[in-house]
Image (cartoon, coloured by chain):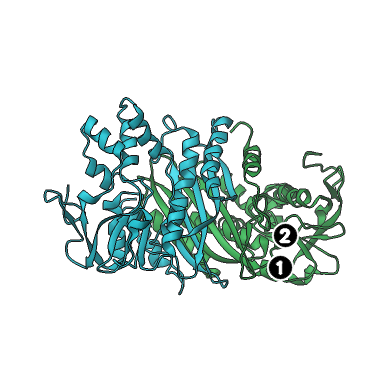
Chain colours: A green, B cyan
Amino acid sequence: MKKGEFEFIDTIRRRFPAPKGTLGIGDDCAVIPQKSGMDTLVSTDMLIEGSHFLLSDVKPYDLGWKSAAVNISDIAGMGGKPVATFLSFAVPKNTDDSFLESFIEGYKDISSQFGIPLLGGDTVASNGSMCINVTILGQAPAGKARLRSTAKPGDIVYVSGTLGDSAAGLKVILEGIHRGPVEEFLIDRHYHPQPRINLGLKLAMTDGVHAMMDISDGVASDLPHILEASGVSADIDVKALPLSDEIRQAAATHGWDVLRLALEGGEDYELLVTADPSADLRKSGLTPIGKIKEKSAVQITWLNAPYMTYNGYHQF
Amino acid sequence: MKKGEFEFIDTIRRRFPAPKGTLGIGDDCAVIPQKSGMDTLVSTDMLIEGSHFLLSDVKPYDLGWKSAAVNISDIAGMGGKPVATFLSFAVPKNTDDSFLESFIEGYKDISSQFGIPLLGGDTVASNGSMCINVTILGQAPAGKARLRSTAKPGDIVYVSGTLGDSAAGLKVILEGIHRGPVEEFLIDRHYHPQPRINLGLKLAMTDGVHAMMDISDGVASDLPHILEASGVSADIDVKALPLSDEIRQAAATHGWDVLRLALEGGEDYELLVTADPSADLRKSGLTPIGKIKEKSAVQITWLNAPYMTYNGYHQF
């Protein structure tokens, strides 16, 4: 794949224009209108051994949890309600049955929190890598799913929860750092992301909420998706980023660059939202971190961090 | 996976009972009722390098075609109309761009025959195997999708098209047999299966059509799925199996056991149907091959082949 993933996706997109009224490639989910006044939401994610996880490292329970959670989070990013998941699993021939049982245990525990049935799938014996694919179906009242393309100049940019904890947890794991309670908290955030389904459903019913997506690659990578799709730019105040006490404490102890973790770390599975100033989402527990502006040559202006540049136009 | 694929699926099924009114694991597709009076059908299939295909052998165009076709065929097996597909693709890092372009070409050519858009997916760089997963959504009027569980004693068993051609084509490829026009026909049937969407839609609207599925593993493996799900048995007349002139000719030339290819070969992607005798499906081009009976200790009785035994109770 020399041209890279995005060019391949562009090739597909050019060959398969989405039918009228349907939203295809380019958001957290596809949106397919039903005659019933509901829209069907669909997302699919693949995890492959060696790229997304190492069998020597990962606990099967955690892998099952995350396989389901990252898909559930795509439905949360649209403000939808999950309906069902479908699991395809290429299993290397020497895999223990106990691995598969623990995997399903983790998959079920996160699915059960939202009452999501697993309604089908495919299991295949693999001579090579372990490969897991989950497809999720969700639904939203017609036109209520929140897209990436609907941010408006003047909107406030919000995020839910705290940022960077998962990336910090991964750092603890990879660097073999001693694990006190603070480090254990961060590791748990890494292995057991909590999709923001209930918050997403609430925001989809809130007037003035314009664009929304889940944060899977970090705000610095994910916000540009909203900005590009909506044809706008943003000011982001890095001092406003919500940070957990645990990440602050661990960053102080271990000398981490906490802003880099919060902006670039990814796997937060929090929500990134833009809303009209009249809708004060602080009441819903969200944190304002900046403002949407008219399109500009500088896609993101980082406030309170004059040394910091990023994102195509700039670099850390 | 020591206990095997079916036990793993049973583990999943026990942990995820399908909600009331919903059909989960165990048919060609899951069936999810919508408020609109339509049912959503969902199926998903994974193909992994080394198990389902060899990169040294397969043409990317053919791999793309088959990846889509086997999923479209699952919708045909329910008598549904395809709505959209979703493609996940783990691509080894040294893969040529031209491979991906040809893959998408084949995927699009079979999808376009039925006007099926590709509405989303996931592409990931793989350090190991190539892995492809396709999920398909379809629809059928509420209650009209044909299941495996609804065969009735007295039903006639039918198949569409001809059987064994794909398996014979694979035999030509694997054994490096010289390719005349007859062999090329069989190879084309192997690489470019034609899902029976239009026939399936017609049968789903035909009174007296009871059970239906697509033939992916061969009648000898697939018919038992209908028999088990419906709690019935069957007499099958092996002399009645529809065979192409090409497979007869090639079998005579190369000394093949044509019945074994037709029954065990798989990848036909034809339809296997049971229907009340009042519905004469010969008019729709199907071939009657036997009859459904009450449940019995012998699941399938093979007529006109007294030497032939198979299927748990018997062996070839």
Left or right: B140 as drawn, with respect to A290:
left
Chain letter for mark 1: A
Residue B36 appears in which quarter of the rendering?
bottom right
Looking at the picture, which amino acid does disc 1 mark? Ala
Residue A313 appears in which quarter of the rendering?
top right
Q: Are marks 2 and 1 on the same chain?
A: yes
Residue A107's disc is none
Q: Is residue A19 above or below residue A40?
A: above
Sort mark 1 into few (<14), some (14-19) or many (20+) by Cα contacts within 10 Å: many
* Residue tagged 1: A204
Q: Nearer the viewer, residue B103 or B141?
A: B141
* Residue tagged 2: A212
Sort mark 2 into few (<14), some (14-19) or many (20+) by Cα contacts within 10 Å: many
Looking at the picture, which amino acid does disc 2 mark? Met
Question: Residue A75 placed where, x, y %?
Answer: 62, 61
Question: Residue A91 placed where, x, y %?
Answer: 40, 48
Question: Residue B306 placed where, x, y %?
Answer: 11, 51
Determine the secondary structure under disc 2: strand
